[in-house]
Amino acid sequence: MHIKRRKNIITSTKVAFIQIKAAFFASVASCFLLIFLCISLPSCSPVTFGSSATPGSSLAKLKAKNSPVVLGIGKTHSAFKKWRDQGYQNTDDHKITFKSHHPDTTESTLPEIISGYSINRLSKRSEGIGLPALITARSGAGHIFTPITAASYISNLRPANILATQSVKDGILHTHFDIYHPYDQTHKGQALKRQPNIIMQYITDLPGNSALDIKGLIRPTKYGKHQGFYLAEPYDKKRIPILMIHGLISSPATYAEMSDAINADPKLRNKYQLWYYFYPTGTPWLVTASKFRNSYRELIKALDPDSNDSNLRKTTIIAHSMGGLITRLSLSTPENTLQQAYFGNVQLEKTVKDNDLKKIKEYFHFQPLTEPKRVIYLATPHRGSRIATSLIGSLAIRLISIPGNIIKQTADVLATGQLRGDSIPEQTRKLLTKGESSINQLQAKNPSLKALNQMQPRKNLTSYSVIGDIGAPLMRLKTDGVVSHSSSRLSHSKEEITVPSNHDICGEDETIEAVIYILSK
């Protein structure tokens, strides 16, 4: 199936940029960060409720009106800010009132509200009335996530909309603020304006969170503290989880547009809830997959201790690029393929200490996850990517601080002569001295990829593939600039959809349409 492109054809310049991205990401990120700091507008701090409002229209114009006037987005922001700056107090000639209609809050429990203008004044916003905003569902500064397990969290941030109306009564200006949920509510039948990426924008701008996609590649061990599951809202047993897993040099922010499109569709929002998984992408995906499986099982046990929630057994995973390899491995039956790929026919049980053998089995011998029912692979390099063996890939590998992995953890055992060096495959011997990064594991000849393509998917699993082609629709180049069409294909996919896109496929309209088409089945 091909989805027709409604945009201009991707230019060769953009393709070139994708290919050099891995080599120059550090310097580019620094430049963008500097520019952002120079041009960003002063932010409006989170406020404890009672807020700021300014008269948006002149008193004379308001007096001529017979009904309250709805303020525009800019005037609402100014009104709200002024009320805050005045200490949330009324004056003799200006009375301010407020009411919350938001399902997650009330007037007494709403601790913070942040104007969307303060987060990103230039952000794209949907049609509608009111000012997009962000609220926290818990009191106390800094409580933006509630832990579920050691590596799972519920977000306390919620999208909101501030609607300001003004009128004049007995010569006194009255401003009233209504707080709504922009996806689930309207104001007198009128749509409420949304700022699609507002939560992602706020989180990524918090101290220490900027450029996590790049930091996670270069210093994966340091930024592993952020690794885990992030639920966009409290778990709802009535809705099916969609788990989004990002790819190399990326973060959950890559799914911002897709997430908004899903939430903006009433039928999909009523059917699904969104989860995200973040991991530092410099870590070998073989290692990440092990941590992913362990954390996922802990999360499921915490949410459904009695194993009677049927919607958890319908979970859909949407996985981009390297995230697809993590997913596919975690839903496959390894048998002995991984151990043979790395250690040949060496009988580790007879030569490796119990503690080391336990570590090896965590990576090489495991049971596939049973809950996810469906996977949507986006531009996944099932058979590797040529960029991993190119000059660009080599430069990127040199910048990565190689994290500890199963090969390095067992190196002391091998070095002591308990295993003969000549009995170990050549690739494994190299790893003992040089280590291994995620980019190494994207090379077609890497043992992990070879083993993955020998495994069988878990039973009762339905897979879909969405593949990018930078030449479509005029020509078929059979590559997205990073991953070839043949590498992205899976023989057991129920359906394969080609979209005109480069490797950064997640935010493309055609990709989002393809995903919604699959989710609507």
Image (cartoon, grey):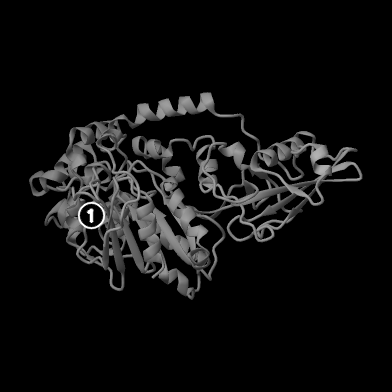
Q: Position of residue 88 (x, y in %)?
A: 79, 40
> At x 23% / y 54%, what residue is drawn?
488
Mark 1 Cα-neighbour bin, 10 Å: few <14, some 14–19, many ≥20: many
- The image quarter containing residue 429 is top left
Q: Position of residue 444 (x, y in %)?
A: 16, 48
Q: Disc 1 designates what residue?
A: 488
Q: Is residue 212 left or right of residue 396?
A: right
Name the residue type under label 1.
Ser
In the image, 194 versus 60, the foreground residue is: 60
Q: Which quadrant would the C terminus be assigned to in this image?
A: bottom left
> At x 21% / y 41%, what residue is drawn?
388
- The image quarter containing residue 400 is top left
Asked if residue 369 is positioned above or below residue 407 in the image, the reply reads: below
- The image quarter containing residue 377 is bottom left
In the image, 449 versus 423, the foreground residue is: 449
In the image, 437 versus 507, the foreground residue is: 507
